Amino acid sequence: MENRLSEFLDRVEQVLERVQPLLPDALPVIDWTVCLAARWQRMGQHGGLRPLQVRLDLHLHDLLGVDRQRTQLEGNTRQFVRGLPANHALLWGARGTGKSSLVRALLAEYAEAGLRLIEIERDDLADLPRVVEQLTGLPQRFVLFCDDLSFESGEGDYRVLKSVLDGSLEQAPDNVLLYATSNRRHLVPERQRDNLDWQQVDGEVHPSEAVEDKVALSDRFGLWLSFYPFTQPEYLQVVHHWVAVLAARAGLKWSWSDELEKDAIRWATGRGNRNGRCAYQFARHWVGLALLEGGDEQRQ
């Protein structure tokens, strides 16, 4: 009997040795007094929060050309941090105009006041009830951040998400808000044919219910902020700002010139857009090239 038991235990140990490398790593317990951000990570049918190391070097004053949006979202966040009523926010519009950067800059601004950021993927939003459950009762204020929330034509899971958002957001504790970004105002493609399917009954026009069904998803957000492509003066203003910031960090002597301005315009033209991301990328290119070509001679 003892020999059989010993053989059985040996086999169990061998099986565990083979299975253990396939199991996901255990998630650490998060100390929110020192951890500023985390990401929801799906593991099989379960999930958990994994702490993130974040840099707080992007500030609200770095975001130019979006003054109105910055003021409104900061005001909403300030209400939230102070325990006052605040709205879930949808930031939508042109790519590269600072939607995601604005949310991350708020963390740098209000981290000391207790603000924390949790990233969650669109495909994991069905886990919202689990996420909210882990945050209930904590003294910190949590912004759940979903970047690039949108759905393609033919996808029906936006209806599932709509019901999840309804249940999760309406029952969420007062220390949780959802901020989402999207290139689409209503999160799903809208087709002209959606408006063609209508019927007239007793003189009343009934638009297609498909339109209302799609628009209803974005109605879950109380604050809508729209972002538009930059004008050329706005774009050049952002270029000037980031060149100054990056040059100062590197100790580079520089001055604004017509040639630099022309280079910045050519850079944007080659990419077919003028936005904050493009301006930042050009500034990195220009400062890096200046340091490479000038070496120590151009350093202060």
Image (tube, rainbow, N blue to C red):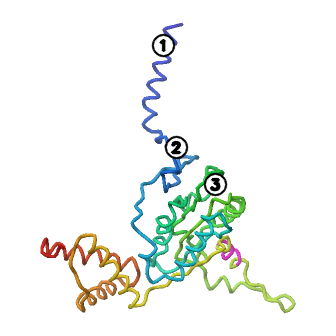
The residue under the point 63% across, 60% down is 176
As shown in the figure, which amino acid type bears the numbered disc 2? Val
Which badge, 3 or 2, is on the more N-terminal residue?
A: 2
The residue under the point 56% across, 60% down is 123
Q: Main secondary structure of the magenta part?
A: helix
Residue carrying label 3 = 132
Question: Label 1's element?
Answer: helix
The residue carrying pointer 3 sits among few (fewer than 14), some (14 to 19) or many (20 or more) residues within 10 Å by Cα, namely: many
Between label 2 and label 1, give the one nearer the viewer.
Answer: 2
Q: What is the quadrant of residue 220 in the picture?
A: bottom right
- Residue 29's mark? 2
Residue 10, given in percent of the width and then of the height, sits at 45, 19
- State yes or no: residue 181 in magenta: no
As shown in the figure, which amino acid type bears the numbered disc 1? Ser
Question: Label 2's element?
Answer: loop
The residue under the point 55% across, 81% down is 226
- Say whether residue 280 is left or right of residue 1: left
Residue nearer the viewer, 244 or 158: 244
Residue carrying label 1 = 6
| C-alpha distance separating marks 3 and 2 | 16 Å
The residue carrying pointer 1 sits among few (fewer than 14), some (14 to 19) or many (20 or more) residues within 10 Å by Cα, namely: few
Residue nearer the viewer, 285 or 173: 173
Residue nearer the viewer, 209 or 65: 65
Between label 3 and label 1, give the one nearer the viewer.
Answer: 3
Where are the magenta residues, as a range?
A: 212-217
Residue occupying the far top of the picture: 1
- Say whether residue 197 is left or right of residue 255: right
Residue 122, given in percent of the width and then of the height, sits at 55, 62
Q: Quadrant of the C terminus?
A: bottom left
- Against 263, is 142 above or below? above
Which badge, 2 or 1, is on the more N-terminal residue?
A: 1
| C-alpha distance separating marks 3 and 1 | 46 Å
